[in-house]
Image (cartoon, helix red, strand yellow):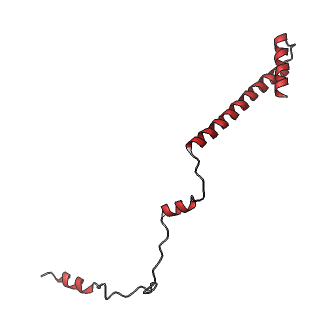
Amino acid sequence: MNPTSKTTSSNKRKANDAAPSSGSNVGEQESRPPGIKAMKAKRNKGKDKVGPALASDNMWEKKEKDMLMREKLQKMSVYNTLLAKNDTLDEDEKVLKKKLMFELF
């Protein structure tokens, strides 16, 4: 003797009785937006992927260039120190100064 069960079942709509939504027409299918994976695949389709061997070769080239630039900066620093010295230079410092000047310029 539960009076709520009768009233709730009569208020429910059946699938056949439901009114069609105003935006959908019979025969037309709504297109879904592409998923995340599909969008990423489309975005990355034209890009060439660099293999690990090419990436490591490129890395070593950059590392070599970096080491050469550091070495050059160190030599310039020593040369600037020799130029800034107010006292007279001894023979070893003169030779080093000439050698650095020749290498850098």
Residue plotted at (24% across, 82% down): 8
Q: Position of residue 62 (x, y in %)?
A: 67, 37
Q: How many marks?
A: 0
The answer to whether residue 65 is above or below residue 93 is below
The answer to whether residue 19 is above or below residue 40 is below
Residue plotted at (34% across, 86% down): 18
Nearest the viewer among 33 and 54 is: 54
Nearest the viewer among 70 and 37 is: 37
Residue at the extreme left: 1
The quarter of the image holding the C terminus is top right
The answer to whether residue 56 is above or below residue 3 is above
The answer to whether residue 68 is above or below residue 89 is below
Q: Is residue 55 left or right of residue 11?
A: right
The quarter of the image holding the N terminus is bottom left
**Residue 90 in view:** no
Q: Position of residue 41 (x, y in %)?
A: 53, 60
Q: Position of residue 87 (x, y in %)?
A: 86, 14
Q: Is residue 73 left or right of residue 60?
A: right
**Residue 69 in view:** yes
Residue plotted at (65% across, 34% down): 63
Image quadrant assignment for residue 71:
top right
Q: Position of residue 92 (x, y in %)?
A: 81, 12
Residue plotted at (31% across, 84% down): 15
